[in-house]
Image (cartoon, helix red, strand yellow):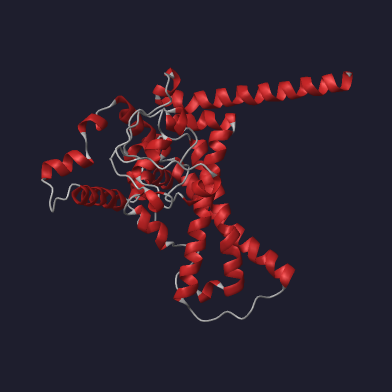
Amino acid sequence: MELLSNIATYIFFPVGYLLHPGTQYYWATYVGAGITAILIYALFKRKALLSITAAKNLVFPKRLFGHASTQLDIKLFFIGIYYLLLQVLLVGGTTFFSVHGTVLALTNIFGDPPPAIGPSWMITAFTMFLVFMAVEFGYWFSHLLMHKIPALWEFHKVHHSAEVLTPLTEWRQHPLELVLFPILMGGASCLVQGPMVWYFGAQSQVVDPMTANYISMAFWYTILHLRHSELPFYATGVLGKIIQAPAHHQVHHSTNPAHFDKNLGYCLSVWDWAFGTLYVPKKGEKFSFGLGHEDDALETAIGSMLAPITRAGALIFKSFKLKQESLKKENNA
């Protein structure tokens, strides 16, 4: 009976995850994104109210949701969501051990921290801001690695093979991505979270710094899921250097070589701006999506899971072989 209960728990785990308010995949975040899209569109069109049909076509365009690329997104969603259990353990474990490890290391180096002050919204807000910026950097850096390291690019190509963009495209990822991104994002956040907890004490913060970041949650419930959409929403000027509007991420998925390796940020553009990977799209600029060439292996769910492994393995083996041959030549010289 216990075995059956455990099996049922695992089978229905994805449903529970979509019902958990503390994650970016909570069902209400998708509703929030839809409402945000309607409000922005109404403001852009200078209409006080959209008809029900217009709103439905905006949020659920038939052309996109009936596309073969979206159908594959749905299949990969049901594969990838089970890896979220592993992702939760990795993120939680990385954050917990890294923060407490950092606090212990700082204590051993500098001694006991100053006496903790009472709960303070200022400390909480500052910690949230620093952690949010660190997570953004962790995402940007992870994303950069996925694009610049050939073996990792073979895995990331699964995501970029999407020919249309919908919020479900977020799930078009190989499991290796679902492991790498959260580990580096969690590790980056600990670089600032650990010292803050060591110096001020977790008890001095109104919200537990290990469990909540309201800045991130504000993005989850508004524009996060719009990143993978084809909505004509642009951010230009200074704003375009700060946030990632949907058009920013459309650039990232563009088949235009001028757009390759651009706009690697998560919610913000600041790290792209700082390191030269930012491309601010012009209003009205249009894009086509995908790899720019056919890749039959990535057009099926099984191929999307297996092809990257064999291709990355071949690249690693080839690199290793070339290094061995190079060393052999040096030794014989």
Residue at image coords 53%, 49%:
274
Q: Quadrant of residue 103?
A: bottom right
Residue at image coords 28%, 49%:
33
Q: Is residue 256 visible?
A: yes
* Residue 287 pos. (x, y %): 35, 31
* Residue 253 pos. (x, y %): 41, 33
**Left or right: where 21 falls relative to 117:** left
Q: Is residue 233 above or below residue 111?
A: above
**Left or right: where 227 falls relative to 109:** left
Between 98 and 195, the residue placed more toward the observer is: 195
Q: Is residue 24 visible?
A: no
Between 19 and 303, the residue placed more toward the observer is: 303
Total residue callouts: 0
* Residue 123 pos. (x, y %): 50, 73
Q: Quadrant of residue 331?
A: top right
Q: Quadrant of the C terminus?
A: top right
* Residue 2 pos. (x, y %): 42, 48
Q: Quadrant of residue 151?
A: top right
Q: Is residue 71 above or below residue 182?
A: above
